[in-house]
Amino acid sequence: MMRSDSLTVLAPGRVNLLGEHVDYNGGVVLPAAIDRYVTLKAAPIRERQVRLTALDLGETVAFHLDRLDDRLDADGRPLPAWAIYPAGVAWAAARRGLPISGCEGEYSSSVPIGGGLSSSAAVETAFAALWRTFGGWQMDNLELARLCQEAENQYAGVNCGLMDQFASANGVEDSLLWFDTRSLEWRALPLPRDIRIVIADSSVRRSLAASAYNDRRAACEQALRILRGPLPQIRDLRDVSPAEFERHQDLLPKIPRKRARHVVYECDRVENAVKALETGDSETFGQLMFRCHSSLRDDYEVSCPELDALVNIAAELPGCLGARLTGAGFGGCTVNLVKADQAQDFAAQLRQRYQQVSGKKAEVYLCRASAGVRVRPSGE
Ligand code: GLA
């Protein structure tokens, strides 16, 4: 049954091309929203309740909008993990005094769960956009992303930066997003027509990813505190140049030193990558992606053998300009930059060789950079 006041929200996942693990260090990131979506259909109801079905899981939950702090469902049981995201968005909105309507709906997702493509951010932006429309909030997509980040940080307990929610909310077709996570300035960078983005899902998932992620962030904060001794003007690791890092790195204990080295050089790579993109030099952009992967593997230590295998195989295939793990790491996906006319063959070969090498199946597909979250009446 389709109610006339039902809305359909489409919220994309994202892939990050460069600028990994810098969004909580004040850096610039280069993600794109992708053509994989959370699709949410919902209608307002009079009760102060949210009644939801996660179609992919075949599960239903109901929770009360006035008892969000408890993290319990309407029958007093702990909320299932998937419901923490919509509940967190409602919680963050309530804290700002925004009107939130009870609703009844269902959603499904073509963004793989836990695959580094921001499945949770897509769920958050979908619900935030839904409640923004129902409640008539005056809020732009950047602020919407911040609200979703608050939900993730303070309700779901993952201390993430703003990149994922930003990309899901603000995506631009056929473009990368240049996003300065400190000043919050951003612009779209059109992707050259002769290259394609190919995503490869290693099918590996790591259960402790959230705590490992929070550990990385803590190590960066420790490095920042120490480097402020000789460099009192720095606000974030982003402000440390490679030369300054080399000069002062001996002050840092081993682990924070490795983490900071990744961040400092990654910020530098982003700068060079943007210049390369602006002059149509996709080769250089791709080389910087390979370097990013090595740094994530050796210094940030967020890769795994399967992701390394995908990158190593990709590097040998015709048409491949660059490859690296994307997102937080600890399993999940790689992103590949491939010449457009060779992208289909590349995907087929990567799939085949990965299975030979790892014994595992990778889903490999060409993706398009897409627009950010959209809301429309369900009948249309
Ligand atoms: C996760 C987080 C982002 C970002 C990336 C790593 O996706 O949600 O904020 O830190 O990891 O770049």
Image (cartoon, rainbow, N blue to C red):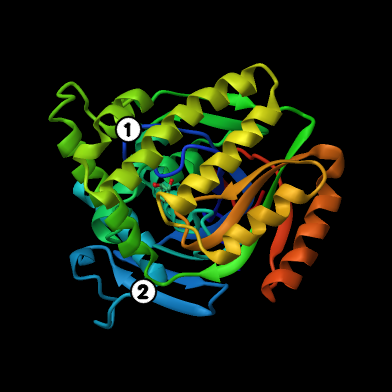
Kind of element beneath mark 2? strand
Q: Nearer the viewer, mark 2 or mark 1?
A: 1
Residue depicted at 35% across the width and 35% down the height:
143
Percent position of residue 267, x then y: 42, 31
Task: Say if 321 sits above or below 6 in the image.
Answer: above
Percent position of residue 120, x then y: 45, 58
Percent position of residue 377, x then y: 58, 48
Dot 1, how many residues are within 10 Å of its Cα: few (below 14), some (14-19), or many (20+)? many
Residue 1 located left or right of residue 51: right
Q: Mark 2: which amino acid?
A: Ala
Kind of element beneath mark 1? loop
Q: How far apart are labels 2 and 1 at the CA level?
A: 38 Å
- Quickly name the residue at label 2: 62
- In terms of depth relative to the viewer, which is nearer, 294 or 372? 294
Q: Mark 1: which amino acid?
A: Gly
Residue depicted at 53% across the width and 77% down the height:
57
Question: Can residue 2 be spotted in the picture?
Answer: no
